[in-house]
């Protein structure tokens, strides 16, 4: 915001403070229909909206209203050209006034109903902004509004997208950043009606300007991942709106991905293994199969890491911040996993962890991206998060057959030694020892709670073994845990990156199960023995010792025998 100074050279800050106070009391500024955001009565005043209105209000008071100029149309008798000249002169007075003029004009073009690309008034004001904007004020304002797309009024959304296309047509560099921001507003699998409408507009616009937009490597890489993940989500559309236009969207998405692969293949090296992740889920498509075959033959992609920035592009900004809070701050392990439940309710469904939601493929695609993002974040932190991984694994099981892609994300992260292998080992070890449990546990994990891990897990491992470099450590680790139900041998643990005897993921999962599992009251665990599984022989031995101790002499003899050192001959 401009500094508050007296005089004509700066905007008077007290007017903005009065505007904030008035909006806080529930009153609206003059022209309440001109607000961008669809705010509710109890919502606090939006700081960006208040600041933008204050700059626009000054332009109206000092220039536009005096000359009877309306930004929505050219009225008879209005001094339209004079107003443009006066605004240009005002902007030349100081740098702060130049920024204020650009900010106010862009906001005015967004909120007026008549601002269209065919309006002469719109073109004149837009030309004025482009000629004055040496500080990229217009691009920053459009970017901020684009990041709030779903909070805008429906009448303002077409106007915003029209200005974005005009920016791309003018070859402004800020247009590339805005396009990436809009892609994050419609993440792969998003079933909201507004997201479908945005996707149907965004794809043709990007294709019209693809040659210029994709000259930037960041735009090319992120658009490639985003388009292919959407192709995977459209295999099982998650809403009626997406199902109606799935064929058209799939055609445009594949055209965009093919163009990027052919003309910017060198840029895809920046995505590392993320390119393979995007291609893997839809490699059976005839249009994708040639791309998959050429990409899988590239040895540099097989050993590359997963860039954090590329994976985060598949999540909404607020969703990425929430997930980062769960992983990096360890919030998922507190309050019996309530933080994880809140995250699931907000971004997936009210009962995602209870097996009664997320039955569509589009949501499963997004869940797979969340799993891969979480594992990639945790790799840098290195902190065991048994509650988070157990909850995400339960969410994949609640999807049934649709959750295969989300479970594949767990196995995909295990292609390299490190954190992901230990996290998956702990999850499988916990689930492979599961026994029939109470109704609360069945409600948490679904009707398949007593069963072994998903049978398609080994198929995923075989699938990855055929694609990536032969990795016996991952294969053996998942085989032993999925079939045997016991802890892996030290040799397999050593090859997976965990030291023998290290107290890490497996011990954390066992301790958490022995104390309290999520969704189970304390009363179901007696004497620290886990009711769901645990070491039955130890529990039985403790019970024997206690009962034998009641006899005369027998208990002592048994106790003495147990205290003597064991020898190799004892077995």
Image (cartoon, grey):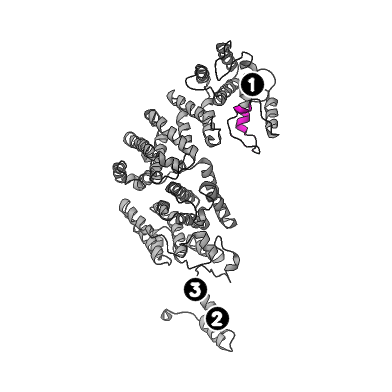
Q: Position of residue 567 (x, y in %)?
A: 44, 80
Residue denoted by label 2:
545
Q: Quick check: 11 left or right of 283?
A: right
Q: Is residue 31 magenta?
A: yes
N-terminal of the two: label 1 or label 3? 1
Residue 396 seen in the current view? yes
Q: Is residue 491 magenta?
A: no
What whole-number distance in Å separates the C-alpha atoms at marks 1 and 3? 77 Å
Tell me if mark 2 has few (under 14), some (14-19) or many (20+) residues whose alpha carbon lies within 10 angstroms of its own: some
Q: State which mark lies toward you, 1 or 3.
A: 1
Contact (Cβ within 8 Å) of mark 1 with mark 3:
no
Q: Report the front residue among 224 and 365.
A: 365
Q: Position of residue 463 (x, y in %)?
A: 33, 54
Mark 2 falls on what kind of element? Answer: helix
Question: Label for residue 58?
Answer: 1
Mark 1 falls on what kind of element? Answer: helix
Residue 383 seen in the current view? no
Residue denoted by label 3:
536
Mark 3 falls on what kind of element? Answer: helix
Q: Position of residue 61 (x, y in %)?
A: 65, 18
* Residue drawn at (52%, 20%) of the image: 129
The residue range painted magenta reads 30-51
């Amino acid at each position: 915001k401009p500094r508050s100074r007296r005089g004509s050279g700066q905007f008077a800050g007290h007017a903005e403070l009065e505007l904030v106070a008035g909006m806080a009391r529930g009153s609206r500024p003059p022209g309440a229909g001109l607000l961008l955001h669809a705010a509710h009565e109890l919502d606090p005043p939006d700081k960006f909206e208040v600041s933008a209105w204050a700059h626009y209000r000054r332009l109206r008071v000092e220039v536009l209203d005096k000359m009877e100029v309306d930004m929505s149309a050219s009225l008879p008798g209005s001094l339209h050209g004079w107003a443009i000249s006066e605004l240009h002169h005002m902007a030349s007075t100081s740098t702060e006034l130049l920024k204020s003029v650009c900010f106010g004009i862009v906001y005015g073009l967004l909120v007026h109903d008549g601002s269209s690309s065919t309006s002469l008034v719109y073109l004149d004001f837009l030309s004025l902004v482009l000629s004055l904007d040496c500080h990229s004020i217009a691009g920053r304002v459009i970017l901020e509004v684009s990041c709030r797309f779903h909070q805008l009024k429906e009448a303002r959304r077409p106007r915003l997208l029209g200005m974005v296309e005009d920016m791309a047509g003018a070859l402004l560099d800020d247009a590339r950043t805005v396009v990436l921001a809009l892609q994050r507003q419609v993440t792969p699998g998003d079933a909201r009606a507004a997201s479908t409408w945005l996707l149907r507009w965004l794809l043709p616009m990007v294709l019209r300007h693809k040659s210029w937009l994709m000259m930037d490597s960041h735009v090319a890489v992120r658009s490639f991942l985003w388009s292919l993940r959407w192709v995977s989500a459209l295999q099982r559309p998650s809403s009626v709106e997406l199902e109606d236009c799935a064929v058209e969207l799939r055609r445009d998405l594949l055209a965009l991905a093919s163009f990027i692969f052919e003309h910017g293949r060198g840029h895809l090296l920046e995505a590392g293994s993320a390119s393979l992740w995007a291609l893997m889920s839809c490699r059976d498509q005839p249009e994708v199969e040639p791309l998959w075959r050429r990409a899988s033959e590239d040895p540099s992609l097989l050993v590359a890491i997963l860039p954090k920035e590329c994976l985060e592009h598949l999540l909404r900004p607020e969703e990425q911040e929430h997930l980062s809070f769960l992983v990096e701050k360890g919030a998922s392990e507190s309050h019996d996993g309530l933080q994880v439940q809140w995250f699931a309710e907000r971004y997936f469904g009210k009962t995602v962890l209870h097996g009664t939601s997320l039955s569509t493929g589009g949501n499963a695609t997004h869940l797979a991206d969340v799993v891969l993002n979480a594992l990639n974040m945790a790799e840098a932190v290195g902190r065991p998060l048994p509650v988070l991984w157990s909850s995400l694994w339960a969410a994949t099981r609640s999807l049934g057959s649709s959750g295969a892609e989300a479970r594949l994300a767990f196995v995909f992260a295990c292609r390299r030694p490190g954190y992901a292998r230990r996290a998956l080992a702990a999850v499988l070890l916990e689930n492979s020892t599961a026994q029939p449990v109470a109704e609360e546990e069945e409600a948490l994990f679904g009707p398949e709670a007593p069963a072994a891990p998903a049978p398609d897990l080994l198929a995923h491992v075989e699938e990855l073994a055929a694609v990536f470099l032969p990795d016996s450590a991952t294969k053996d680790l998942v085989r032993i845990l999925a079939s045997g139900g016991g802890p892996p041998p030290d040799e397999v643990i050593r090859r997976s990156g965990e030291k023998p005897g290290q107290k890490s993921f497996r011990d954390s999962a066992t301790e958490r199960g022995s104390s309290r599992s999520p969704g189970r009251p304390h009363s179901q665990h007696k004497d620290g023995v886990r009711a769901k599984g645990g070491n039955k022989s130890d529990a039985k031995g403790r019970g024997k010792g206690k009962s034998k101790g009641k006899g005369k002499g027998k208990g002592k003899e048994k106790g003495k025998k147990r205290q003597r050192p064991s020898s190799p001959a004892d077995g």
